[in-house]
Image (cartoon, helix red, strand yellow):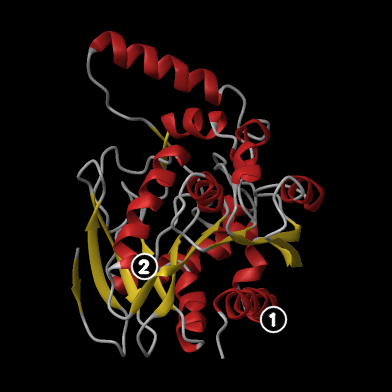
Amino acid sequence: MTRTGDMAQPSRVEFRTLDGVTLRGDFFQAAGTGVPVVVMTQGLTLLKEHYIPDTARRFQAAGVSALLYDHRGYGSSDGFPRHQTNPAQQAEDYHDAVTAAGSLPGVDPARICVWGIGHSGGASMISVADDPRPAAVILNMPFISGAMDARGFPDGLLAAAWREREAATRAGSWQPSYVRVWPDSPENARGTGEQPLLRGEQPYAFITGGLARSEAAGTPWHNKITLQSFYHLARAEPRDLARKIKQRALYIAAVEDPLTATVEDHRAVFETMGPNATFAVVEPDHLATYFGEPFERSVAVQLEFLRRVFELG
């Protein structure tokens, strides 16, 4: 793993996965030695610059370092195909990010917390279920079920993914096709033109602000995801692994969450977990918790959990 920069600002880091892919990110180093570290990455199609540095800085100020990185195939990280989401592969990459985090300056490798949100929350749920090394996990409004997700896919999407797979297998080569995820204009957000996977003015405002941040950092982002991603998403069932999680866990659900599941569905998954898990509900909805007072309330719950688990002053 390589690292550049100083402690005052996040430093750029890169590390290699077991299969040799280089992933890149930012390290927010807290003062002191032997400090805990949170391993963080963003949700569906999103990058490390898309709002989660706000959370990382709060952790850093509280004495907890944070490693943020881009998923393989996205942003600063290497990997082919580009713009493909596979929760099982992302869970594997979390393993290697944990390895990298444990060797960062000032970090106590026995005090690592894995953090995920939305679809990365699902990947983190899969990852920690079989990784004995992390001491804790924060499941922030996680993706819990591909079967549930697939009910909201546009008609014919999964059938198209299977046709593409068959054609590529017969041809002996694959050129991925893509699906647009976020609205790309105010008019599109209001229902004009071909509709993306996520619809409405709130997703448009969210991704517009996020894109300004990644552009300022010089990190490339594209509004698309491979068609094969929907095969990988539909077959993933993180909720089936929740019962295996033995780490100290904070499970957060939003009162309204059209992107993952209802509070009741999240609570049902939480109730399969052991006595080391805590459940919290935040208001008002998934995307709103990135900003303003909803963000403050959500990050306060997470900080209280980290202080308790890692016995911070």
Most distant residue in the top direction: 170
Q: Amino acid at mark 2?
A: Ser
**Could you tell me which secondary element the residue under label 2 belongs to?**
helix
Query: In front: 257, or 269?
Result: 269
Few, some or many C-alpha atoms within 10 Å of disc 1 (few <14, some 14-19, many ≥20)? few
Q: In the displayed structure, would residue 107 be above or below residue 250? A: below
Q: Which residue is mark 2?
A: 214
Q: Position of residue 45 (x, y in %)?
A: 44, 50
Instruction: Place residue 253 in its image quadrant.
Output: bottom right
Q: Position of residue 119 (x, y in %)?
A: 54, 49
Most distant residue in the right direction: 264
Q: Which residue is mark 1?
A: 293
18 to the left or right of 124: left
Q: Could one spot residue 96 in this view of the protein?
A: yes
Q: In the displayed structure, would residue 29 be above or below residue 249? A: below
Q: Residue at x 50, y 47 (%)?
A: 123
Which quadrant does the C terminus fall into? bottom right
**Could you tell me which secondary element the residue under label 1 belongs to?**
helix
Q: Position of residue 221 (x, y in %)?
A: 35, 56
Q: How many marks?
A: 2
Residue 122, labelled with which disc?
none
Query: In front: 86, or 95?
Result: 95
Q: In the displayed structure, would residue 145 be above or below residue 106? A: above
Q: Amino acid at mark 1?
A: Glu
Which quadrant does the N terminus fall into? bottom left
Q: Residue at x 73, y 45 (%)?
A: 272
Q: In the displayed structure, would residue 157 be above or below residue 85? A: above
Few, some or many C-alpha atoms within 10 Å of disc 2 (few <14, some 14-19, many ≥20)? some
